[in-house]
Image: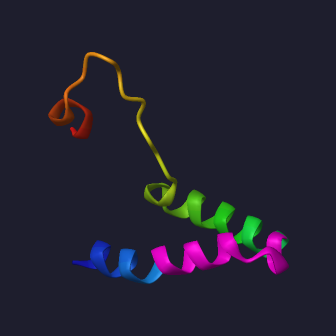
Amino acid sequence: DLNDIKTEIFLPLISTISKDSRHTEFGTIFLGRLYKKCPYTVPYYPIRQPHMNDKQYLE
């Protein structure tokens, strides 16, 4: 699947670039373009409500 290949390639690259403090401007520009082209790379952490069980939260 093409999406699996993209994930294998981009996730380690994104992690490396975001942690490298020497190239902050490049990292900002690169991640901005990546987020624009592929919104699935934007981290999203839903807020867990007190009444939710594990199954509901992970849906």
Q: Nearer the viewer, residue 23 or 33?
A: 23
The residue shown at (58%, 66%) is 34
Q: From the viewer's perspective, is residue 9 above or below residue 57?
A: below
Instruction: Look at the image and say whether residue 22 sits in the magenta stretch.
Output: yes
| Percent x, y of residue 20 | 73, 77
Q: Which residues are magenta?
A: 11-24
Q: How many marks?
A: 0
Instruction: Look at the image and say whether residue 47 sits in the magenta stretch.
Output: no
Q: Nearer the viewer, residue 49 or 37?
A: 49
Q: From the viewer's perspective, is residue 50 above or below residue 26?
A: above
| Percent x, y of residue 52 | 24, 23
Placement of the N terminus among the 4 image quadrants: bottom left
Is residue 9 found left or right of 50 in the rendered image? Answer: right
Q: From the viewer's perspective, is residue 52 above or below residue 26?
A: above
The residue shown at (20%, 35%) is 54
| Percent x, y of residue 30 | 69, 71
The residue shown at (43%, 83%) is 9
SS assignment for the magenta stretch, majority: helix
| Percent x, y of residue 37 | 54, 63
Quadrant of the rendered structure where residue 59 is?
Answer: top left
Which residue appears farthest toward the top when viewing the image? 51
Quadrant of the rendered structure where residue 16 is?
Answer: bottom right
Is residue 5 found left or right of 40 in the rendered image? Answer: left
